[in-house]
Image (cartoon, grey):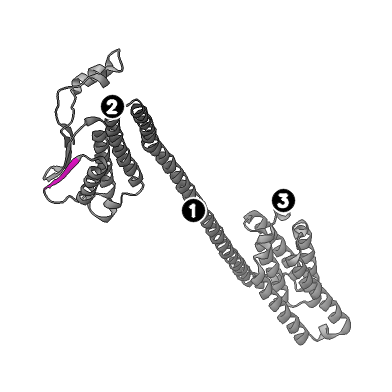
């Protein structure tokens, strides 16, 4: 136990010692009152030599407390401090022979040691027992055993009061410190969350930019490259005097330009579907069909059957993207002259149908051709004209 006591004394932190500021303030007030009481009530203590000795001992006793409280590296001297204070209190008690002063000084030492050594209960108990033993010796030396027996109950109550007060105060201080630590941790967590949110936002923006770059590459870049090749072919046919062939290539170039324009607008609109933000799904689909007809040159019709549906924004956006892709495929591959988009709402749910009068295909034949040994046969297989339906 003594080894643990010494190690605890050597490891006392500055924060633990500094937490007892109000306790030391009360202690100095009590010491000042006790000094005045001794001088006023004991005539012998007003003699020059006893008064000087008593004053010096009290000043050293109080000065050591202040020095120990403010000293930056006091942890190394904790054991020496507590032992020297015990010697001073014993000397003051033997000199003054005042019961109240003796008990007050020893109980103050017990409370001070509890504050310094907390939360090591064994070290606190060892220090308290040591001071009580010195107090008993002090009382026996001055007044005898009979007085000690009379003071046992009062001494026990005062000791319990001091320990309860000091321990309660230390716990309150520790609770405030724990609350401060928790607040700092919450602030740090909030700061990290803000940093993570900023990183996620930056990553999302980066991914969206990459997606748009791919979209524009697949639409504008390839479309313009095809237009350049077609215009070069037109120029060659005109130089050769083949106007009929040149006019046919110009017609193909015009169709490619319309398709490229439509796909480019669709890619740009994917950043922010304004029609979907300004109205409901039906209005957004109607606007998309109208824009498709304008940019592609293909006649397009939009019909709504049933009450306008109420769908979640995420679902509405997915439906709009599907219709955009279906119309884009029609402009690319179907060679259609008319497209019909129908939005049907009934008791079973929501249905979106995209139909065109262009070239159709046989799904079973296309599937068989993709699994055959010739990977290009699916592209060359065409069924008889039939409407293409997407739902």
Horizontal and vertical percent for residue 45? 82, 83
The residue stretch that appears in magenta: 299-305
Left or right placement of residue 366 versus residue 112 in this view: left
Q: Say if 351 sits above or below 332 in the image.
A: below
Q: Residues within 10 Å of mark 2 (few under 14, many from 20)?
A: few
Residue carrying label 3: 7
Q: Give how far apart the Cα atoms at labels 2 and 3 are.
A: 102 Å
Q: Which residue is mark 1?
A: 194
Asked if residue 301 lies in the magenta stretch, the reply is: yes
SS for dot 1: helix
Q: What secondary structure is the magenta-colored segment mainly?
A: strand
In this orientation, which residue lies closer to the viewer: 10 or 227? 227
Mark 2 / mark 1, whichever is N-terminal: 1
At 44% from the left and 39% from the top, the residue drawn is 210
Tell me if residue 291 is in the magenta stretch: no
Q: Badge 1 local density, few (<14 within 10 Å), some, or many (20+)? A: few
Q: Which residue is mark 2?
A: 245
Place residue 278 in its image quadrant.
bottom left
């Amino acid at each position: 136990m003594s080894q643990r006591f010494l190690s605890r004394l050597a490891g006392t932190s500055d924060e633990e010692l500094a937490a007892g500021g109000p306790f030391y303030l009360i202690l100095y007030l009590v010491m000042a009152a006790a000094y005045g009481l001794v001088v006023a009530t004991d005539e012998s203590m007003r003699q020059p030599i006893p008064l000087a000795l008593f004053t010096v001992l009290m000043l050293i006793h109080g000065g050591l407390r202040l020095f120990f409280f403010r000293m930056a590296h006091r942890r190394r001297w904790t054991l020496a401090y507590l032992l020297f204070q015990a010697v001073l209190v014993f000397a003051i008690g033997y000199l003054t022979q005042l019961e109240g002063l003796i008990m007050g000084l020893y109980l103050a030492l017990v409370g001070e040691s509890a504050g310094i050594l907390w939360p090591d209960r064994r070290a606190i108990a060892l220090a308290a027992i040591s001071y009580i033993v010195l107090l008993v010796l002090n009382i026996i030396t001055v007044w005898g055993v009979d007085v000690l027996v009379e003071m046992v109950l009062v001494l026990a109550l005062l000791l319990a009061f001091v320990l309860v007060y000091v321990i309660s105060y230390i716990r309150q201080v520790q609770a405030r410190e724990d609350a401060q630590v928790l607040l700092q941790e919450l602030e740090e967590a909030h700061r990290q969350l803000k940093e993570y949110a900023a990183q996620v936002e930056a990553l999302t923006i980066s991914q969206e930019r990459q997606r748009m770059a791919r979209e524009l590459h697949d639409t504008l870049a390839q479309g313009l490259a095809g237009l350049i090749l077609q215009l070069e072919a037109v120029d060659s046919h005109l130089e050769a005097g083949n106007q009929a062939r040149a006019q046919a290539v110009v017609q193909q170039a015009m169709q490619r330009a319309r398709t490229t324009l439509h796909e480019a607008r669709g890619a740009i609109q994917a950043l922010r579907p304004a029609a979907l933000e300004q109205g409901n799904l039906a209005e957004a689909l109607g606007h998309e069909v109208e824009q498709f007809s304008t940019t592609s040159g293909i006649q397009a019709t939009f019909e709504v059957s049933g009450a306008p549906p109420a769908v979640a924004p995420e679902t509405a956006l997915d439906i709009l993207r599907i219709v955009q892709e279906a119309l884009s495929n029609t402009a690319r591959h179907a060679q259609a002259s008319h497209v019909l988009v129908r939005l049907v709402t009934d008791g079973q749910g929501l249905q979106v149908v995209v139909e065109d009068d262009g070239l159709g295909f046989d799904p079973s034949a296309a599937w068989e051709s993709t699994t055959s040994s010739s990977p290009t046969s699916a592209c060359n297989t065409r069924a008889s004209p039939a409407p293409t339906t997407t739902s």
